[in-house]
Image (spheres, helix red, strand yellow):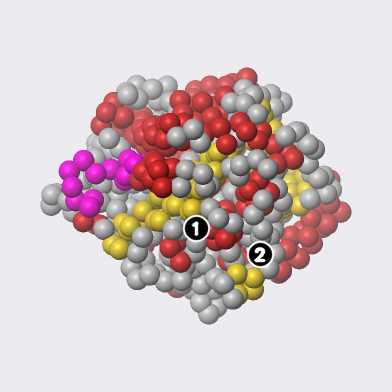
Amino acid sequence: MATRPDIVLVLADDMGFSDIGCYGGEVRTPNLDRLAASGVRLTQFYNTARCSPSRASLMTGLHPHQTSIGILNYDDSPDGYAGTLNDSCVTIAEVLGSAGYSTYLSGKWHMSNDLRDPSGAWPTRRGFDRFYGTLAGAGSYFQPATLTRDEENIEDEALREGFYYTDAISGNAATFVREHHAARPDDPMFLYVAYTAPHWPLHALKEDVDAYAGRFSAGWDELRRERLRRLVSMGLIDESWPLTDRDPNVPAWADAGHKEWEALRMAVYAAQIDRMDQGIGRVLDELEASGRLENTLFVFLSDNGGCAEEMPPETAEDFVTAFVDFAPVTRDGRKVVPGNHPGLDPGPETTYATYGTAWANLSNTPFREYKHWIHEGGIATPFIVHWPAGLGAEATVRTSPHQLTDVMATIVDATGAEYPDSFDGRDVLPLEGRSMLGSLRGEPADPDRTLFWEHEGNAGARRGPWKLVRKYGSGWELYDMERDRTELNDVSAGHPDLVAELSAAYHEWAGRCGVLPRERVLEIYAARGHGLPT
């Protein structure tokens, strides 16, 4: 019997469909490009539009609502989602640990509502042998809150000069590979590398930012057109799908003010991705040096589309404190200024900014909408699979649609592990996903399978070429994804029976999986003092 593969699962945070080089972007990502050049790229892989829910679905093979994480890791029980992994799910680490794998996590967890005291939803208690990273969802790259090793808070480690969280995630991931091979060279491992890059705040190292000087000066309009041309030439986007219009809230680049500052925002965002790719290279180097890369199932994806959240100066501090443990001063006592201020250059730890709607529109080229929404801009992610021993080493593009629930099923299939009916004395919900190994090898997709999504009342279902989607408070839209994946021609009026069929399937799924009504979601947000994103 062939040796069981190692599994390396790498997740980016708030990164759009077309940012990295091998998906048409301007960011230099030679290590990801290298994986794509001898691996498989999927053109229609979907996440669930938001950080915590995507992580919950990825780690469990269930829909996020089934795991009690329907919005974020906030405790909204008893009337809302508990915001923490429940006892009805089992993680990839728990399944593979039972099959003899060593299990490691370096990076962001974001699946427990207890950020300071170890609970049953911490990674070390959900199957991971070793953990280095953060429990929280976002924060400073220079002074991250909730930094933890195994179950010990180590925030003081970030006080040392030169600390940068992306590098720390990469370094610890590489160390896990090296130490595992030294201690258990013949045994398989599962490594989950969960970056916070390029999630806001815009924090990057000067050398990386400087490398993108002038790269985005052409502006978002021209760069979107350039990306589309590259995506078409790579075979990732059909040339018949037109580019979506510029977001109506975004001015034409010719009319934009503060162009130099705007270009810098995108340069810092690009630098964050660039540094992540450098770190991925460190992990690949360790795998290659140990002779393990050939039989490693290596997967890369993002948890949602580009993030259009703005941070106006007048509300910036309220914005960040609503979501993160915001440190008002740096490690050496300098004031941190939150918000998007023309003239205040993002990048250093004294700032706390986002890159905004216009650049998120570029990140999600050629699609519309963003993180939070179920239109393609919110849920479409680059997805790279590299496994020479199992899939060959020829650059391949596959177009079958898949979603996060399928990752667990694929890993179970590839490793020969067993997904349990019960685990550690608790009953476990059946796996929702399906193995992608057939699709990755070129087998046709099941035309009758239906994919489902819901987040904050935004909802969708897809069967074959047909995608039904709606924004909260609006009616259903229907798109033919073979002819119109950029969702510009709503054909719902011409197919009422199909709308009724897919909406009925969606409501059956939503009831079965514990999806809250939109009205309840609105009440939860209002109770926290802020509304749904607009």
Tell me residue 510's x, y (percent). Answer: 69, 65
**What is the span of residues highlighted in magenta in the rendered image?**
157-171
| Vertical side of 264 occupied by 503: above or below | below
Please give the residue where the numbered disc 2 appears in the rendered image.
420
Q: Secondary structure at mark 1?
A: helix
Q: Is residue 56 visible?
A: no
Pick the residue in front: 116 or 203: 116
Dot 2, how many residues are within 10 Å of its Cα: few (below 14), some (14-19), or many (20+)? some
Residue 468 tag number: none
Dot 1, how many residues are within 10 Å of its Cα: few (below 14), some (14-19), or many (20+)? many
Residue found at x 70% / y 64%: 430
Q: Secondary structure at mark 2?
A: loop
Pick the residue in front: 296 or 280: 296
| Vertical side of 348 occupied by 107: above or below | below
**Three-letter code, disc 1:** Ser
**Quadrant in the picture for residue 365:** top right
Q: Residue furthest bottom?
A: 78
Residue found at x 56% / y 32%: 294
CA distance for labels 2 and 1: 24 Å
Please give the residue where the numbered disc 1 appears in the rendered image.
52
Considering the image in quadrants, where does the N terminus appear? top right
